[in-house]
Image (tube, helix red, strand yellow):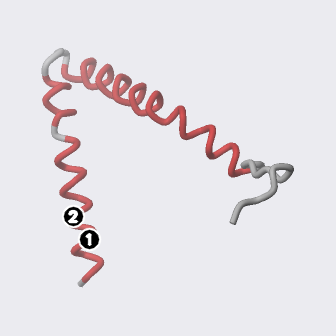
Amino acid sequence: MALPEEIRADFTGDAAVSDRSGDNQLMLLLAALVAIYILLGILYESLLHPLTILSTLPPAGLRALIALKYAIQI
């Protein structure tokens, strides 16, 4: 069953803003990682140490999600 051609659906209001903001999410994530790298580089006065610290974030995040999954089940 299809709608007639003169009826058209579009996102409006908060849904439209949310839809548009999703496009910028990757750029925001990359900017945050660069900012954290620069901050860690300043704190540790090294170019290598921030990379080793940031490389541990994905496995730590995954383990945190797994821990939350099992904590909710208990």
Residue 54's x, y, as percent? 21, 33
Q: Is residue 40 above or below residue 45?
A: below
Q: Is residue 59 above or below residue 1?
A: above
Tell me, yes or no, whether the two marked residues, 1 and 2, touch with CB atoms within 8 Å: yes
Cα–Cα span, label 1 and label 2: 5 Å
Few, some or many residues within 10 Å of mark 1 (<14, 14–19, 20+):
few
Residue in the image at 63% along x and 38% along y: 20
Label 2 element class: helix
Q: Is residue 67 above or below residue 43?
A: below
Query: Residue 30's quadrant in the figure?
Result: top left
Label 1 element class: helix
Residue 33's x, y, as percent? 34, 29
Residue 24's x, y, as percent? 53, 32
Q: Quadrant of the C terminus?
A: bottom left
Residue in the image at 24% along x and 51% along y: 61
Which residue is nearer to you in this view: 66 or 1?
Answer: 1
Residue in the image at 18% along x and 57% along y: 63
- Left or right of 16, for residue 27: left
Q: Quadrant of the N terminus?
A: bottom right
Give amino acid for label 1: Lys
Query: Residue 40's quadrant in the figure?
Result: top left
Residue in the image at 76% along x and 52% along y: 9
Q: Residue furthest right?
A: 6
Residue 57's x, y, as percent? 22, 42
Labelled disc at residue 61 = none
- Left or right of 21, for residue 55: left
Q: Is residue 18 above or below residue 53?
A: below
Q: Can you identify the residue that label 1 sits on?
A: 69
Which residue is nearer to you in this view: 63 or 36?
Answer: 63
Give amino acid for label 2: Ile
Q: Can you identify the residue that label 2 sits on?
A: 66
